[in-house]
Image (cartoon, rainbow, N blue to C red):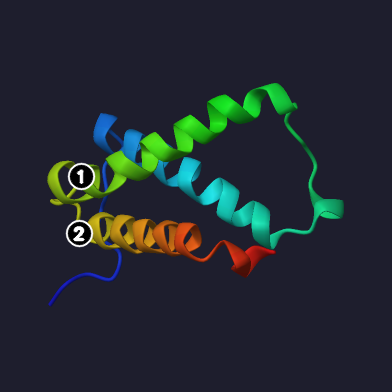
């Protein structure tokens, strides 16, 4: 029987996985949180860098999830669900409008 709370070590693979997840979930959370509750708004000059970083993380996350962190049981599933949500957010931009 699988454990509901398996031990996941803190190493280079899991740190990069957390960075990829945070970068992909940031704009999705921005669509959900109202503007009046946001504490920090980045300058417009950062948006070009942020958009490119978001696209790069979206491309890398599925490969990182299935190849690198596959041995840590729930991370591959969490990464694939996040990738699917980010992909759906790109397909249906009217959801957050």
Q: Quadrant of the N terminus?
A: bottom left
The image position of residue 16, as x and y in percent, is 34, 34
For marks 2 and 1, give the one nearer the viewer: 1
Going from N to C along the chain, the mark reached first, 2 or 1, is: 1
Q: Position of residue 59 (x, y in %)?
A: 31, 42
Q: Distance between the residues labelled 2 and 1?
A: 15 Å
Residue for point 44% across, 57% down:
86
Residue farthest to the top, as pictured? 45
The quarter of the picture where the C terminus appears is: bottom right
Dot 1, how many residues are within 10 Å of its Cα: few (below 14), some (14-19), or many (20+)? some
Front one among 8 and 64: 64
In this view, which residue lies farthest toward the right?
36
- Disc 1 on helix, strand or loop? helix
Characterize the local packing of mark 2: few (<14), some (14-19) or many (20 or more) Cα atoms within 10 angstroms.
some
The secondary element bearing badge 2 is classed as: helix
Image: 40 above or below 79: above
- In this rendering, the count of numbered labels is 2
Q: Where is residue 39 in the image (x, y as percent from the top left)?
A: 80, 42
Query: Residue at coordinates 23% horizontally, 42% vertically from top-left?
Result: 64
Q: Name the residue under label 1.
A: 63
**Residue 50: percent from left, percent from top:** 55, 31
Where is mark 2, residue-wise? 73
Asked if residue 37 is positioned above or below residue 9 in the image, the reply reads below
Depth check: 18 or 64 in front? 64
Quadrant of the image occupied by residue 55: top left
x 87%, y 53%: residue: 36
Question: Do residues under tags 2 and 1 come within 8 Å of each other at their CB atoms?
Answer: no
Report the residue at 79% width, 59% height from top.
34
What label does residue 87 carry, if any?
A: none
Position of 33 compared to 35: left or right? left
Instruction: Please state if 95 lies on the left or on the right of 56 as rendered.
Output: right
């Amino acid at each position: 029987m699988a454990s509901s709370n398996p031990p996941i070590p803190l190493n280079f693979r899991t740190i990069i996985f957390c960075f990829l997840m945070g970068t992909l979930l940031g704009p999705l959370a921005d669509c959900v949180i109202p503007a009046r509750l946001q504490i920090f708004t980045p300058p417009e000059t950062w948006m070009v860098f942020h958009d490119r970083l978001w696209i790069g993380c979206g491309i890398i996350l599925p490969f990182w999830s299935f190849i690198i962190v596959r041995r840590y049981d729930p991370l591959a599933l969490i990464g694939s669900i996040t990738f699917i949500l980010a992909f759906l957010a790109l397909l249906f931009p009217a959801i957050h409008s």
